[in-house]
Image (cartoon, rainbow, N blue to C red):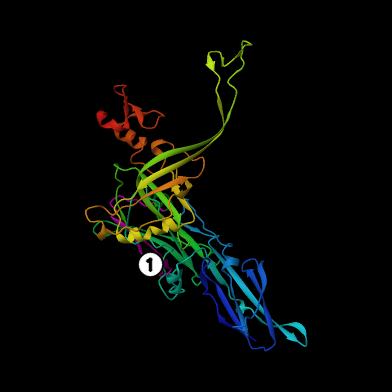
């Protein structure tokens, strides 16, 4: 008979060990056959055999992480008209069947079969450090009936946001609720409620992961929320009795400072969610690598003369066959708390980083540098606790002038609205309609 000694929790991170350990009471045990199947379709993910060892002769064990970590992946949905969206790729359910094979009279014979009573185990796209994994409880990141769950982020709570920020919250749910809702409440500066919206989570029996788009710019679209007079807002998950089933995430709303150019950097965090931080002062560098070839400068020209020029133009000695252009962008943070500085290590650990363009599209980027010395305020006496990063955009991505990134306050459109000017299709310049004089955005105060 097969006994399970240890097995993973119902929801487990795919990037950590997923140990199944079994033992057998049959003295004639030879090995175990293991079959791992996809829960929804029943398709076989893998079949293999595991054997006893000299140190463990009546049983065996297997780590399923290598088999299963590739069946889940990160997922991003930027739709600003959806406060709530299900995530189908972030979580996968699987079932395991273990059969003991024994030696009966010299013949290998199938014996007892373990199927875990038709239970489904889940993996989600995450990889935790060993210390955090050892203290992980089943309900910490899963909305359930017995505890209050956390969202899939290590970002400190109580964040400042503006109309340009990109903010997402991801969470898991165990299917034990018939109804769940995403709730957003806005408050004025004195703490009086301004507005409240709830949006139902659909298909709770189908999806185990969801994302919330809680950016102010998005919730104006998805929930018709107005942020006029709002001092802060609170986001959580509630049941049909309005009982909170998740932590509360609090965001302090403020106007964007028109003195800054902003860049929203997003990345897949170690819990499988999407984190973001709003950097400032982007400085772009264009890097071009060229493939070229030498050529003879002399040739028969249009006049039939063998010469090194034709029609008054000297022939080139080098011909460019192709160009490969990459953009490197350097940016800095605002003042960081110690908690924010520690959390930003997630950016360096992430396997996928994005930069948000002014259109809302995300561009893949690679973080340059592999070392991050976590700054701490008490060691930076006399200076601000900040960090700077450098990102290389995906090949062929070239910034489109001052409106390249997710910023409106410093864009030519903002200057136009403030000055009532006609804007030319030249980044940074326009014409004053009264005088006809051209101006640069650097000297726009001349025309106020």
Picture residue at 70% right of the left edge, 87% below the top: 28
299 or 334, nearer to the observer: 299
Quadrant location of the C terminus? top left
| Residue 419 position in % (x across, y down) | 29, 32
Q: Which residues are magenta?
A: 223-250
Is any part of residue 358 visible from this angle? no
| Residue 262 position in % (x across, y down) | 36, 45
Picture residue at 58% right of the left edge, 62% below the top: 70
Residue 248 on the magenta segment = yes
Quadrant location of the N terminus? bottom right
Position of 37 with respect to 212 (left or right) is right
Which quadrant would residue 145 be assigned to in this image? bottom left
Label 1's element? loop
Residue corresponding to mark 1: 247
Q: Is residue 392 above or below residue 117?
A: above
Q: Is residue 145 above or below residue 362?
A: below
Number of marks in the rendered image: 1
Q: Is residue 368 above or below residue 66?
A: above
Residue 14 on the magenta segment = no
């Amino acid at each position: 008979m097969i006994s399970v000694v240890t097995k993973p929790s119902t929801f487990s991170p795919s990037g950590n060990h997923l140990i199944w350990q079994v033992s057998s009471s049959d003295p004639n045990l030879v090995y175990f056959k293991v079959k791992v199947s996809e829960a929804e379709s029943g398709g076989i993910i893998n079949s293999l055999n595991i054997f006893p060892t000299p140190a463990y002769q009546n049983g065996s064990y297997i780590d399923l992480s290598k088999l299963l970590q590739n069946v889940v992946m990160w997922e991003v949905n930027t739709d600003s008209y959806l406060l709530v969206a299900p995530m189908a790729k972030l979580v996968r359910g699987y079932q395991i069947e273990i059969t003991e094979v024994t030696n009966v009279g010299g013949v290998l014979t199938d014996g007892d079969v373990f199927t875990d009573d038709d239970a489904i185990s889940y993996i989600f796209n995450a990889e935790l450090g060993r210390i955090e994994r050892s203290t992980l409880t089943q309900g910490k990141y899963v909305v359930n009936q017995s505890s209050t769950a956390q969202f899939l982020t290590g970002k400190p709570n109580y964040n400042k946001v503006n109309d340009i920020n990109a903010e997402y919250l991801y969470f898991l749910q165990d299917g034990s609720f018939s109804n769940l809702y995403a709730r957003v409440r806005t408050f004025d500066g004195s703490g009086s409620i301004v507005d409240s919206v709830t949006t139902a989570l659909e298909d709770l029996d189908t999806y185990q992961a969801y994302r919330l788009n809680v950016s102010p710019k998005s919730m104006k679209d998805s929930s018709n929320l107005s942020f006029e007079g709002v001092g802060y807002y609170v986001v959580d998950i509630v049941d049909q009795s309005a009982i909170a089933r998740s932590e509360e995430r609090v965001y302090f709303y403020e106007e964007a400072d028109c003195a800054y150019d902003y860049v929203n950097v997003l990345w897949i965090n170690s819990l499988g969610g999407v984190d973001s931080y709003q950097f400032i002062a982007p400085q772009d560098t264009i890097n071009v690598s060229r493939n070229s070839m030498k050529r003879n400068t002399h040739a028969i020209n249009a006049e039939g003369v063998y010469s090194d020029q034709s029609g008054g133009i000297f022939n080139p000695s080098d011909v460019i066959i192709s160009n490969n252009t990459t953009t490197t962008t350097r940016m800095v943070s605002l003042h960081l708390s110690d908690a924010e500085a520690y959390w930003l290590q997630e950016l360096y650990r992430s396997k996928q980083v994005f930069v948000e363009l002014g259109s809302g599209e995300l561009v893949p980027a690679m973080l340059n540098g592999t070392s991050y010395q976590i700054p701490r305020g008490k060691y930076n006496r006399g200076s601000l606790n900040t960090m700077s990063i450098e990102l290389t955009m995906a090949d062929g991505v070239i910034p489109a002038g001052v409106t390249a990134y997710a910023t409106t306050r410093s864009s030519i459109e903002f200057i136009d609205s403030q000055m009532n000017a006609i804007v030319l299709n030249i980044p940074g310049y326009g014409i004053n309609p009264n005088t006809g004089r051209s101006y640069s955005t650097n000297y726009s105060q001349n025309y106020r």
